[in-house]
Amino acid sequence: MTPEESKILKRRLYKIIFEADTPAGKLFDVILIWSIILSVILVIVESSHEYHDRYQVWFTAGEWLFTLLFTAEYILRIYTVRKKSVYILSFYGVVDLLAILPTYISLLFPGSQYLMVIRILRLMRVFRVFKLTTFISEANTLRKALLASSRKILVFLSAIALLVIVIGSIMYVIEGPSHGFKDIPTSIYWAVVTLTTVGYGDISPQTGVGQFFASIVMILGYSIIAVPTGIMSAEFSRMRNRTDNSTARVCQNCMREGHDPEARYCKFCGGIIDTD
């Protein structure tokens, strides 16, 4: 095979593996998604001792079949990308690697193959298939709303972290070790459980003052839960008013997608996007 033929082959494989705007690319993603689902179901069913003892040989064969399939896919992804380190260190690259490692690690540490359920994260690629349907608009809106509200939510969580420290310290002073609040970290744990309205009940105030203070914290918890929901709702509403004509074309330089159909240059890194 000549260098030119090798280059053409690599480009064709890249479009099939990384893009879903072509029939071949969509078919590849559909096959990949069903393979991921079946492999995860296999791991879940294998965890049942009843089926594991009766069909151990079949489970082992299935695990290795899917692992070798995903290993070949991972190698092809590295082979076809222009900047290999960018893909390997990307979110999907790390998830792809973690999806195949448990089976090989199980050769040294039996039982670790059950960590293969992490393959379920690879189903996030289903949104690439949805790019060919009306669902992609909602998927992009949700993603952008999450990114747009991330700073506000981070500030909110920081404020909550300070609040639970204060609440936990106050409850430690009120109740003390004699009522189960043996130290401030334990009291902070109680504050988190109470403020989030989870209420495990393993630690509870015994004094009247402590119960009154806990009631205030519980009521405060209901109002706090609504804050991140409101932030996300506002951003989601704002994003839905924007139009999105992006496709599943992936830049070979930065491995990011979401470019316009007629785009020749990546809007994220400025690199040239293959158009043929």
Image (spheres, rainbow, N blue to C red):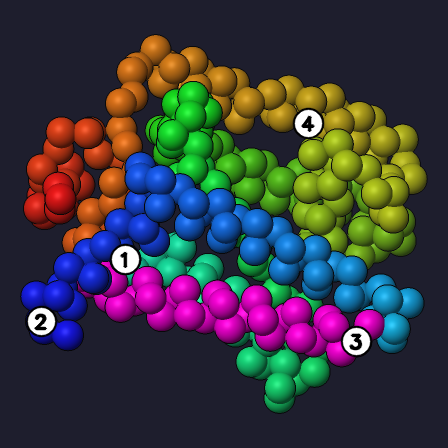
Q: Given the image, on which type of amino acid does mark 1 rest?
A: Leu
Name, please, the residue furthest toward the bottom. Answer: 108
Q: Secondary structure at mark 2?
A: helix
Sequence-wise first label, 2 or 1? 2
Q: Given the image, on which type of amino acid does mark 3 rest?
A: Gln
Q: Residues within 10 Å of mark 4 (few under 14, many from 20)?
A: some
Residue at 35%, 40% in the rendered image = 23
Q: Which residue is mark 3?
A: 56
Q: Given the image, on which type of amino acid does mark 2 rest?
A: Pro
Q: Nearer the viewer, mark 2 or mark 4?
A: 2
Q: Secondary structure at mark 3?
A: helix
Residue 158 marker: none
Is residue 202 located in the magenta-colored stretch of the structure? no
Q: Given the image, on which type of amino acid does mark 4 rest?
A: Gly
The magenta span reads 55-84
Q: Residues within 10 Å of mark 2 (few under 14, many from 20)?
A: few
Residue at 60%, 74% in the rendered image = 64
